[in-house]
């Protein structure tokens, strides 16, 4: 059993937007840019072979995400950039993998974690306006191992999202 998650990667333009944020603030442990992603579903203890099988079989369509409107905190420690527009994609992923996920999963809240703060610390970056949009064209299956330096993410599988073919769903005679 392993820790894993299904996520949407960020494109280069979105990464550039995030890299413009002031990352020189005290009391923040910054997430490395190569680990930025949007988690669709997290699995705290899962059979990786079974998850890989389900990951390779479910269908999902591309989605458009929008950053913002402001940098905020989730909980008392996670410094995040909110992401709107991906709920339908996340619901599809979650329905397809529901049996493998923990029963006490939190609902999907689209965001990119950019840092973690000390308890009761509010960085100056909170409230900073941020704006941008991007297309999610791929999903990643990632194994996550917690170590002394934080989480190490390893790509297990990747898949392109299937465009919705309207003609395949037509009832024309």
Image (cartoon, rainbow, N blue to C red):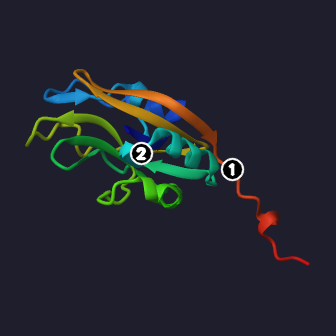
Specify few, some or many for label 2: CA neighbours under 10 Å numbering under 14, 14-19, or 20 or more: many
Q: Report whether residue 170 is seen.
A: yes
Q: Residue at x 45, y 27 (%)?
A: 154
Q: Secondary structure at mark 1?
A: loop
Residue 51 position in % (x across, y down): 50, 45
Residue 12 position in % (x across, y down): 53, 30
Residue 82 position in % (x across, y down): 36, 49
Q: Residue furthest top?
A: 149
Q: Is residue 122 above or below residue 163?
A: above
Horizontal relation, residue 88 to residue 100: left or right: right
The N terminus, quarter of image: top left
Distance from disc 2 to disc 1, alpha carbons, whole Å, reads 19 Å
Q: Residue at x 44, y 42 (%)?
A: 47
Front in this rendered view, residue 123 or 74: 74
Front in this rendered view, residue 151 or 85: 151
Q: Is residue 92 above or below residue 15?
A: below
Q: Residue at x 52, y 45 (%)?
A: 50
Residue 150 lies in quadrant? top left
The numbered disc on residue 39 is 2
The residue pinned by badge 1 equals 162
Horizontal relation, residue 58 to residue 122: left or right: right
């Amino acid at each position: 059993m392993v820790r894993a998650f299904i996520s949407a990667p960020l494109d280069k333009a979105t990464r550039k937007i995030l890299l413009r944020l002031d990352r020189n603030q005290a009391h923040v442990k910054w997430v490395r840019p190569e680990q930025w992603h949007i988690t669709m579903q997290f699995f705290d203890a899962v059979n990786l072979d079974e998850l890989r099988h389900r990951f390779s079989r479910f269908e999902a369509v591309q989605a458009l995400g929008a950053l913002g409107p402001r940098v905020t905190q989730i909980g008392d420690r996670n410094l995040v950039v909110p992401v709107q527009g991906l709920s339908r994609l996340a619901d599809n992923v979650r329905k397809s993998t529901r049996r493998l996920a923990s029963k006490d999963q939190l609902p999907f809240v689209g965001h990119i974690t950019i840092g973690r703060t000390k308890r009761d610390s509010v960085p100056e970056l909170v409230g900073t306006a941020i704006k941008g949009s991007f297309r999610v064209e791929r999903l990643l299956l990632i194994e996550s191992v917690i170590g002394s330096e934080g989480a190490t993410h390893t790509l297990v599988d990747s898949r392109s999202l299937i465009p919705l073919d309207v003609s395949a769903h037509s009832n024309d005679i």
